[in-house]
Image: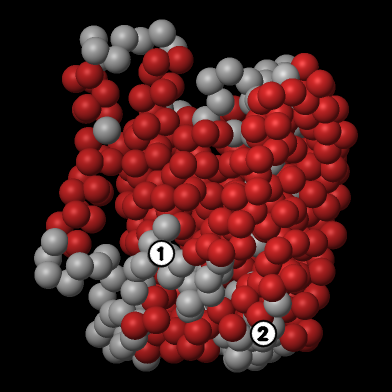
């Protein structure tokens, strides 16, 4: 599904020997592409791009210069920035060094992904690793001075230790992820529920083992208690500084953009399921004409609701220097685009439904989708960076056929090359990025 991020393929079981063979070339190729990207980016565009210059590089430079006061206006805790300042101390405080630091975290994340797909015994581990490394939304941030690489690496470490049932160590990695990006606290709850699901799928009685579960989740509870304490401390937020335009609130454009990214990035899978979905709809219409007619009638208000419900209230989402805003500006300014998009989204529903029905029993995809939407709800700016973690988890639990996995690998590769080239050519202080 990836309009989503890193795609693990299905969690079906293959032989350990096959998994080992399959996981050898992919991480080397993935690592090489990340290194090549950061080298090309640093050579072709050795200038600060968007938030590199707005927030991150100035904060790192401040720490490097010995001023360890909180950087003014930084919209997140300066955890990543302190680590990057230490890296600058070891080498030199240059942009290419800090971009290299992001790429190094990306390479480490790739190899953690290899360990994760082995523990999950994925059916197509090569593709799972490449889907992760070449996730089109994430790919440019493997080479930029942003917090995304550090956040993703911490979350992968948490998932790795979670799969090894080292829950306290996993919670420590989750705490680090939250210190890098405070919104990651949502995934603390998700991993806690995942643990409970693991216990139940193993045949353990939830009632009988409540005490043991509580002890295993102690670390998660501490993180959540700290987050609640920060929210109730009088500031009402998890960060130190606040950018007024980014105060938590619902933005309907976020959900439209998320749906469009799922549609676009998962295009090869949807194309494969398009014809079976159409046959299933026609068969249902012939067998149950009354229900089909009711569904057709219900689709009309659904389209109207999508047309009327769109709004693009955030002023930053009207800046066409950013790729993310192109569809939002078109939706907000051209009624015909809004109508066509609403019709497309409603007509598209049977296709992911067909994919969904093919998932194995007990799949975590429903829970993942719920938490993805919860994660996005308070983000006021419609921005693909917020989709990186949801896409990672959606793909981690999606079951792909070999054909789907191969097509997604090729599609992600093409899109990542295109986005990387765009950033190298057009990236600048006021745009040229997602």
Residue 247 is left or right of residue 414, and the answer is left
Residue at image x 49%, y 48%? 372
| In the depicted structure, whether residue 237 falls above or below residue 123 | below
| In the depicted structure, whether residue 34 falls above or below residue 206 | below
**Quadrant of residue 214 within the rendered picture:** top left
**Image spot of residue 209 (x, y percent):** 25, 14
**Quadrant of residue 66 within the rendered picture:** bottom left
Residue 250: which numbered mark, if any?
1
Residue 83 is left or right of residue 256, and the answer is left
Tag nearer the camera, 2 or 1: 1
- N-terminal of the pair, mark 2 or mark 1, is 1
Q: Badge 1, how many Cα within 10 Å: few under 14, some, many 20+?
A: some
Q: Secondary structure at mark 1?
A: loop
**Image spot of residue 178 (x, y percent):** 35, 57
User: Could you tell me how far apart the alpha carbons at marks 2 and 1 are, in whole angstroms?
Assistant: 22 Å
Residue 125 is left or right of residue 205, and the answer is right
Residue that lies at the very extreme toward the left in this rendered image: 233
Residue at image x 38%, y 18%? 199
Q: Secondary structure at mark 2?
A: loop
Residue under circle 2? Answer: 320
Residue at image x 66%, y 40%? 297
Location of the C terminus by quadrant is: bottom right
**Image spot of residue 189 (x, y percent):** 34, 41
User: Does the rendering let one see residue 24?
Assistant: no
Q: Badge 2, how many Cα within 10 Å: few under 14, some, many 20+?
A: some
Residue at image x 83%, y 38%? 274
Question: Which is more toward the observer, 257 or 151?
Answer: 257
User: Does the rendering let one see residue 119?
Assistant: yes
């Amino acid at each position: 599904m990836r309009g989503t991020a890193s795609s693990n393929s299905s969690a079906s079981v293959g032989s350990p020997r096959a998994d080992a063979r399959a996981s050898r070339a992919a991480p080397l190729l993935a690592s090489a592409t990340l290194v090549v990207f950061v080298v090309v980016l640093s050579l072709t565009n050795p200038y600060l791009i968007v938030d590199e210059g707005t927030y991150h590089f100035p904060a790192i430079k401040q720490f490097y210069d010995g001023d360890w006061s909180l950087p003014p206006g930084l919209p997140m805790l300066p955890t990543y920035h302190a680590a990057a300042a230490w890296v600058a101390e070891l080498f030199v405080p240059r942009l290419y060094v800090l971009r290299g630091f992001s790429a190094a975290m990306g390479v480490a994340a790739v190899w953690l992904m290899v360990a994760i797909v082995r523990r999950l015994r994925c059916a197509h581990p090569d593709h799972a690793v490449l889907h992760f490394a070449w996730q089109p939304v994430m790919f440019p941030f493997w080479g930029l001075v942003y917090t995304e690489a550090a956040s993703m690496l911490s979350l992968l470490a948490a998932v790795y230790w979670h799969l090894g049932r080292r829950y306290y160590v996993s919670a420590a990695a989750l705490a680090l992820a939250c210190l890098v990006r405070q919104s990651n606290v949502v995934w603390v709850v998700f991993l806690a529920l995942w643990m409970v699901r693991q216990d139940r799928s193993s045949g353990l009685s939830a009632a009988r083992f409540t005490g043991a579960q509580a002890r295993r989740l102690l670390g998660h509870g501490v993180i959540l208690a700290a987050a609640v304490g920060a929210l109730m401390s009088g500031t009402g937020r998890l960060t130190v500084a606040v950018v007024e335009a980014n105060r938590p609130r619902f933005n309907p454009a976020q959900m439209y953009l998320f749906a469009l990214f799922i549609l676009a990035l998962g295009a090869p899978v949807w194309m494969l399921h398009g014809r079976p979905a159409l046959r299933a709809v026609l068969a249902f219409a012939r067998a149950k004409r009354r229900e089909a007619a009711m569904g057709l009638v219900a689709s009309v208000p659904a389209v109207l609701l999508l047309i009327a419900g769109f709004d693009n209230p955030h002023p930053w989402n009207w800046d066409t220097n950013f790729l993310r805003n192109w569809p939002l500006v078109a939706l907000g300014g051209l009624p015909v685009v809004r109508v066509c998009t609403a019709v497309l989204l409603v007509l598209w529903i049977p296709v992911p439904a067909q994919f969904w029905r093919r998932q194995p029993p007990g799949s975590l995809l429903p829970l993942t989708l719920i938490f993805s939407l919860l994660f996005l709800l308070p983000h006021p700016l419609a921005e693909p960076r917020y989709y990186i973690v949801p896409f990672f988890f959606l793909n981690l639990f999606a079951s792909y056929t070999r054909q789907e996995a191969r097509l997604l690998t090729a599609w992600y590769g093409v899109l990542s090359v295109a986005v990387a080239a765009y950033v190298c050519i057009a990236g600048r202080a006021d745009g040229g990025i997602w």
